[in-house]
Amino acid sequence: MKKYIFFICVMLWLVNVRSQAQEKLIFGDTGTTNTDPTYRPRDKDYKQKRLVSIVKTDTKGLLLGNKCMRDVTTAMGFEYIAQPKGQPGHLNEFARFWHNFGSKVTIFFKNGPFWKFKLKKKRKECRQQMGDFTG
């Protein structure tokens, strides 16, 4: 029994000594430290992002004139295009459905499965921020 108590005391003493032996070294600035680097990264010329278009016949709730909302949709990689019925170049219902279906699949893989919820939340924030929100 005395051996065990002695062994435990020695182990605790060793752990205590090792934890106190470490000192934190602070080096500070050396003679070769460059505080004002001459290298300045250049802005990269990114290719213009090709936006996916979603065709809508009704613009209610889209906030097309809102700059905040335009920035949000551009960041998500798409834009809304308003094509009222009867306009030249108007897609019929079938063609518009398949065009929007392909666009939404592309947006799904680009922004994740909950992109509509994110967009709805951002739309509400943009409406409040720009004063388009009532209630």
Image (cartoon, helix red, strand yellow):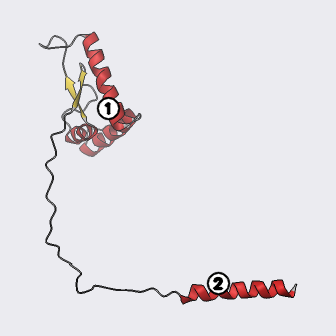
Residue 15 image label:
2
Say what amino acid the circle numbered 2 marks.
Val
Depicted 22 relative to depicted 120: above or below: below
Depicted 85 relative to depicted 113: above or below: above
Residue 93 image label:
none
Q: Quadrant of residue 5?
A: bottom right
**The C terminus lies in which quarter of the figure?**
top left
Q: Quadrant of residue 54?
A: top left
Residue 46 rendering spot, x and y as whole percentages = 16, 46
Residue 107 image label:
1
- What is the spatial separation of the Cα atoms under label 2 and label 1, in whole angstroms? 57 Å
Q: Residue at x 13, y 72 (%)?
A: 38
Is residue 105 toward the left or the right of residue 32 in the image?
right
Q: Residue at x 25, y 21 (%)?
A: 56
Residue 135 in sight in this render:
no
Badge 1 crowding class, 10 Å Cα cut-off, few under 14, some 14 to 19, many 20 or more, is many
Q: Secondary structure at mark 1?
A: helix
The residue nearer to you, when weighing 5 against 91, is 5
Q: Residue at x 17, y 73 (%)?
A: 37
Residue 90 rendering spot, x and y as whole percentages = 17, 14
The residue nearer to you, when weighing 113 against 1, is 1
**The N terminus lies in which quarter of the figure?**
bottom right
Say what amino acid the circle numbered 1 marks.
Ile
Badge 2 crowding class, 10 Å Cα cut-off, few under 14, some 14 to 19, many 20 or more, is few
Depicted 22 relative to depicted 127: above or below: below
Is residue 40 toward the left or the right of residue 63 in the image?
left
